[in-house]
Amino acid sequence: MSVEYISEWLMHDLCPLDVSHLKVLSTNAHVQVLRWEKFAPALQTIEALDFVIPWARTGIDLSSLPNLLLVRMSVTSEAGWQTALDALSTIAAPTSIRRLVIYRSFIGRVWCEQLDSQLACLPACTAPTVELEMDTISGALTVGDLNDCFPHMASRNLLRIVDRVDNWFEDATVNGLTLSQISAPDQKCLRAVCKPLRYAIEPLIFGPASIVVDFYEPRLEVTLSFLETLGRGNTGWARCSRTFDIRNLVPDDDAFMTLDSYFAEWKLEVNDQEQMIRIVANFLNTLDGLDDVDLTQDDPAYTDISLYTSLDRLSGLRRFGFVSRPVTSHRAIFSWMARIVAKSPRLEYLSLPSARGWPDIIEILERENIRLTGIAFSHAIPELFAYLSSYSGLQHFAITSPATDPLADVFFDSVLPRHKDCLLTLSCPAYYEGEWCLGPRNLQVVSQLQNLQRIHMCVTADDIHTV
């Protein structure tokens, strides 16, 4: 279990997770979880612990985990090294720890001698095997020299030099650590299953996700290290991800030629010259095969709408979206959108920012007999629900600010039943408790959505136990 992004949920009184039988824990830099009252029972059961020390901070008492078998510690900064030594000093003799895996991004002779001196305090009969995960060896220090830097550990034959790996969890759970009670034949069968199972699950986890690499000076070293890790191909990200997002860097043209397809994004800035806007608009207008357009305006300081209105030759779109933060009310924007919709009889998906421009566009949808299969908008209006009630076949429905309760009745009574056999995604999260929330009033019609794959709705406090 990793706690990096779910700490608030774990601490909540309503969290159903029981950690009293926890065996393997990866905390990243969040070692403070071991001091949470909720994790007190887990201190007696944890057998494998993985954590990171990025800088000098409150340490960790390894003696508080009496059944610990494996410790994996990553020290990612010079400032955190003393914290790491302090953590190692808490290993009580005799210790149950059998493997101590230590990674430091830069290994030097002084560092090795300090570590060897610290570990020499443990009795020979109970001292763990020490594995050094290495990326870079400093200066004249070679792998052969490491035995000289670790005289105590080398003399006991307790030192190993290993490559940095990403599948530590598999090693921890399969190599007899958390499964010490399982017989050897059963462990052999489990090992045979574990890797194929990983290859089956990884595409489901990493396939839909995007790898984002942002090049800027403060994190340049970290970014390059990340790319090296991807290049080794030992992670699920490298094996299964299909989208690679590069920011603040233009790759070499020759690299582009090796790709089957790629997506280029141009962000319009406040200080961009008008000539640049015209060049981009003229280029987009020449793309006869363009059928998917998604425009985003998220800079409040940018008020020039000339780029959008100059895209007057767009036609035959299949998907069309415009997002504005803050929500735009510029009449010219909606007039331009209406013209685009009128020239796109094959339109399937439409996403618009506010209610003001919808009536004109809905009129065009009805006049041209365009039946959308996907729609996203910010506010409910009667004209929209009247249009959606006129046909069936909607697959994706999203509304970000369903604030008017009377229209909720119209939606659940008249709109949703028309599309109950084909709707795949439904998103209508309410800002406050009311008729847009999932409850007894609309539960029956929502339960009839047999093909629904994703739903995003809110519930009222009173209905939590009755729904």
Image (tube, helix red, strand yellow):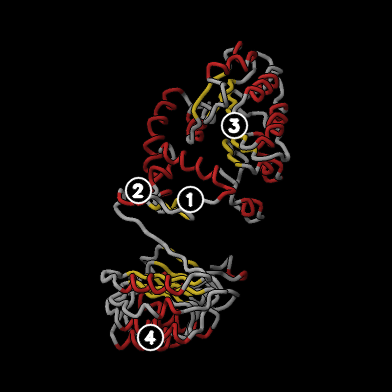
Q: Amino acid at mark 4?
A: Ile
Which residue does the numbered mark 1 point to in the structure image? 213
Q: Which mark is residue 255?
A: 2
In the rendered view of the protein, which quadrant contains the N terminus?
top right
Q: Earlier in the sequence, mark 2 or mark 1?
A: 1
Residue, disc 3: 104
The front one of 187 and 173 is: 173
User: As shown in the figure, which amino acid type bears the numbered disc 3?
Assistant: Arg
- Secondary structure beneath label 1: strand
Dot in front, 2 or 1: 2
- Under tag 4, what secondary structure? helix
Question: Is the residue marked by circle 4 packed among few (<14), some (14-19), or many (20+) residues within 10 Å?
Answer: many
Mark linked to residue 362: 4
Residue at 59% over, 27% down: 107
| Crowd class of label 3 (few under 14; some 14 to 19; many from 20; radius 10 Å) | many
Identify which amino acid the numbered label 1 is placed on.
Val
Which amino acid lies under the numbered mark 2 shown in the image of this protein? Answer: Ala
Q: How many marks?
A: 4
Front residue of this view, candidates 17 and 141: 141
Q: Secondary structure at mark 2?
A: helix
Rendered position, 327 above or below 72 = below
Q: Position of residue 383 (x, y in %)?
A: 42, 88
C-beta proximity under 8 Å, tags 3 and 2: no
Q: CA distance from mark 4 to mark 1?
A: 40 Å
Q: CA gap, disc 4 to disc 2?
A: 44 Å
* Front label number (3 vs 2): 2
